[in-house]
Amino acid sequence: MSNQKTAIITGITGQDGGYLAKLLLSTGYRVLGAYRRGATETFEKLKEHGILEQIEMVDFDLLEFSNICRLVKKYQPDEFYNLAAQSFVAASFEEPIYTAQADGMGVFYILEAIREFSPKTRFYQASTSEMFGLVQEIPQFEKTPFYPRSPYGVAKLMAHWATTNYRESFGLYTCSGILFNHESPFRGKEFVTRKITAHFARMVVGETDKPCELGNLSAQRDWGFAGDYVECMWRMLQQNEGDTYVVATGEMHSIREFVLEAGKACGWDIEFSGKEDSEIGTDKKTGKIVVKVNPKYYRPAEVEQLLGNPAKTKQKLGWEPKVRFAELAKMMMEKDIERAEKGRL
Ligand code: G4F
């Protein structure tokens, strides 16, 4: 197939990498999966998607400029999706320098490699709603001023502006997707939604009796489905020119509400009681405590609420989020119960 498109996806072992690879493979792309050798992540997600054999794995490290240059020069990809990052906000307070180098500088390396060796390559940067941090208006859209609240948000903001700047300075086709939180059964277990569903699933199959310990239950997020969001990334790279897009559902829910929805899928009717550090969630039917607050999960600076306005994205890209909050929580909960029952959680 001579007109087959080639795409490089960094962060191929992550949640979004798997969904995006699946989408691109289904439309005939050659997919190069870039991953960091020795990364703690394995290929489990790609195996579960059933696509591991169809992806050509290539070594990649956001901190190794020479490696990035060789990769871009060798494959001259039509599309380059940068989904690799140190993506856990809480960890960025402990590893700020690494996070700044990987999530910030790493993007300059990729952009320089594209500029030098393959300027026709269309580039997608995984920007994030964490850049809005201490939100300056509600809801947030493409022109809302940024106010990051973590080293992660600061590093991502640098990469975001680098992406815009290389478009304006060098005429590269670059896009930033300002993605609000997006989840799925393939979400990493360090993130709050999956932490909850994985823990609840262990309780359901009798693997543990202990409640799930969480931090700030009042934080609110605009949660969408990762499968919907990767389709939007692809659409961004099929336009006449690059741009910045907010990707969100336009609905906001608290951690408490996610706990309630996940609990429903376990057959529980959870009631919250107590305040702040001593808040607990109890299943009314059995009296069992299923959630409790542990202040160790509080963050040095919190992003209290994020709510996106995806009007431009819907209008320009014809994109619509399909999976909504309650369905998302149910989907994640059911999959984790199924995994727990098979001993594969
Ligand atoms: O699930 P989280 O860890 O996601 P967070 O920090 O919003 O970041 C995610 O979304 C961003 C987009 O907005 C991405 F850029 C980023 O890479 C990542 O994908 O935490 C969500 C909220 C926070 O307010 C946190 O304080 O949940 C609160 N939370 C409460 N208890 C907890 C916990 N978060 C985690 N991870 N673990 C807890 O026990």
Image (cartoon, rainbow, N blue to C red):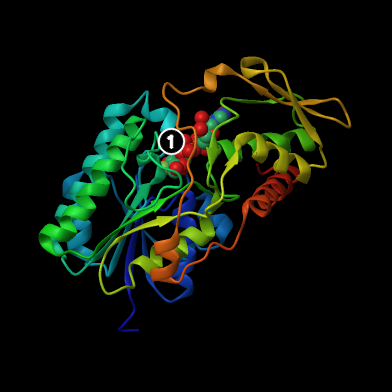
As drawn, is 89 to the left or to the right of 188? Answer: left
Identity of the residue drawn at 17% across and 46% down = 65
Q: Residue at x 28, y 62 (%)?
A: 243
Q: In this view, does 17 lie to the left or right of 243?
A: right
Tag 1, which secondary structure? loop
Which residue type carries mark 1? Phe
Provide residue 31's location: percent of width, then percent of height.
38, 66
Residue 215 to residue 10: above or below: above
Q: Residue at x 60, y 19 (%)?
A: 294
- The reply, left or right, for residue 265 in relation to residue 311 is right
Q: Quarter of the image for the C terminus: give it.
A: top right
| Residue where numbered disc 1 is placed | 88
The residue lying at 78 percent from left, 30 percent from top is 271
Picture quarter with the N terminus:
bottom left
Q: Residue furthest front?
A: 137
* Residue 6 image position (x, y, % from top left): 32, 70
Callout 1 environment at 10 Å: few (<14), some (14 to 19), or many (20+)?
Answer: few
Q: Can residue 63 be seen in this view?
A: no
Percent of width and height locating residue 255 = 61, 35
Q: Cβ of disc 1 within 8 Å of ligand 1? A: yes
Percent position (x, y) of residue 154? 29, 35
Q: Give whichever of 78, 279 is nearer the camera.
A: 279
- 213 or 253: which is nearer to us? 253
